[in-house]
Image (spheres, rainbow, N blue to C red):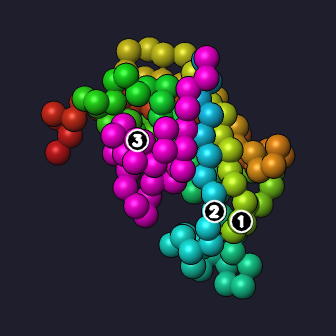
Amino acid sequence: MNREELKKILPHREPMLLLDESEKVGEEVLSSYKVRGDEFFLQGHFPGKPVVPGVILCEIMAQGSALIMADLMSRSIPLYAGIDGVRFKRMVVPGDTVSVKARMISRHGNIFLVDAIATVEGEMCSRGKLTFMLIDKETWK
């Protein structure tokens, strides 16, 4: 799926849409985002040496996990319910393409636990277990 197709599933829009493409392959979701260099989160992080903030890498991993829940997202909004064991191993800078591999570990009703790994050129930059809660769009106000 490209960005326009992802907008039919994800509630995110620019400047917070942080995926260029995503696809479900078997039990895994594979996604990517190319860091252009003009993103708002790079403007002051850090002057002269822009580095993608860790919290943004977590958001890229979260959005990269979305197709796991895609069947339910037509009527639901995914919200973070937890971020566990996240580690950052490599800086991500303009020009890098972040690739995310996500797989569901477990599901309990509207709660999803996902293992997500983000890499750049095959080298891990971040990894963690992400918990999502789906909230009904009708009650979202």
Range drawn in magenta: 1-26
Quadrant in the rendering for residue 127: top right
- Residue at the far bottom: name it: 48
Name the residue at 56% across, 74% down.
38
Q: Tell me residue 90's x, y (percent).
A: 80, 55
> Toward the viewer: 69 or 9?
9
In space, the residues marked 1 and 2 are separated at their CA atoms by 5 Å
Pointer 1 with pointer 2, Cβ within 8 A: yes
Decide whether the magenta segment is chiefly helix, strand or loop: loop
| Residue 95 image label | 1
Q: Residues within 10 Å of mark 3 (few under 14, many from 20)?
A: few
How many neighbours does mark 2 have within 10 angstroms: few (below 14), some (14-19), or many (20 or more)?
many
Residue topped by disc 3 = 5
Counting residues from the N terminus, which is met first, the one under dot 3 or under dot 2?
A: 3
Asked which secondary structure carries label 2, the reply is: loop
Q: Nearer the viewer, mark 3 or mark 2?
A: 3
Q: Position of residue 104 (x, y in %)?
A: 57, 21
Q: Position of residue 132 (x, y in %)?
A: 45, 32
How many tags in the picture?
3
